Image: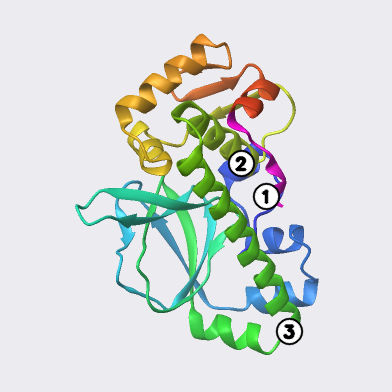
Amino acid sequence: MPASRRSATAAIAGVSLRDALSAAGLGAHLVALLEEIPAKAVQIDPRRPFRAPGASRDEVIFVRSGILCKYKNDGSGRRQIVALRFPGEGILPHEGLADYGIQGIVRSEILVGKAEDFDRIVNTNPELCRFFWRLIQRNELISYEWLVNCGRRDSTARVAHLLCETATRSGLRGELRRMTNPFTQQQIADITGQTSVNVNRVFADLQRQGLIERKGREIQFCDWAEIRRLAGFQPTYLG
């Protein structure tokens, strides 16, 4: 399900399925079809597994508010967060058992529908097939960027890139950017492939360089152009 261009206020209040689909360019008649899918509203508490790895994914998920993550564990049980879903985005059905788990980064509200209802509508409307294929391609581009981030950038650039991406996907605008950091230090470590101790050092370094200021969970981007340069952040992959 799609991401929409929206303000940070809208993201906090919750994004409707109709608004997200319309903002992504889907026609009104197709939006109406998807809105007819029976869906259950579910509240997800943060940092508690919502779906465990190895379970069936015969469902479609739409994020109204909060942030979901997909995660995988290595052989020793250490976790890597491999994807995020912001308000207005979603998780499509997966055939068979999924090797990733799902949980909330923060308290989140989602809509959950059955895969069979979703598939029936999509399979009979080629325009919807193309629409969701484009969303799959977007998610692939984000995954490629994350691979480069963890594989080639240094620890400071990794965290800076995540902050830039989070600000952009949250809909922040303008040079004077302020956001509430939704992540714990351990979650940032699980996304960027490092330790929480090192993440703490990175934040201190970003502050020493005058790139951010922090007050509790509030982050002020003091030099947006420079932190983008440091991170190697080019938002074109976000569509």
Question: Is residue 111 rendered to the left or right of residue 137?
Answer: left
Q: Position of residue 54 (x, y in %)?
A: 29, 71
Q: What's the distance in space between the residues labelled 3 and 2, CA to CA? A: 30 Å
Question: Is residue 210 rendered to the left or right of residue 68?
Answer: right
Dot 3 or dot 2: first in sequence order is 3
Magenta-colored stretch includes residue 232 = yes
Q: Residue at x 46, y 42 (%)?
A: 150
Question: Is residue 177 rendered to the left or right of residue 51?
Answer: right
Residue 87 in view? no
Dot 1 or dot 2: first in sequence order is 2
User: In which quarter of the view is residue 88 placed?
Assistant: bottom right
Tell me the quarter of the image containing the N terminus. bottom right
Q: In the rendered view, would you say 168 is above or below 220?
A: below
Q: In the rendered view, would you say 189 is above or below 60?
A: above
Q: Residue at x 64, y 59 (%)?
A: 138
For residue 237, the mark is 1
Task: Name the residue tied to disc 2.
Answer: 170
Q: What's the distance in space between the residues labelled 1 and 2, CA to CA? A: 15 Å
Q: Secondary structure at mark 3?
A: helix
Q: Nearer the viewer, mark 3 or mark 1?
A: 1
Mark 3 packing: few (<14 Cα in 10 Å), some, or many (20+)? Answer: few
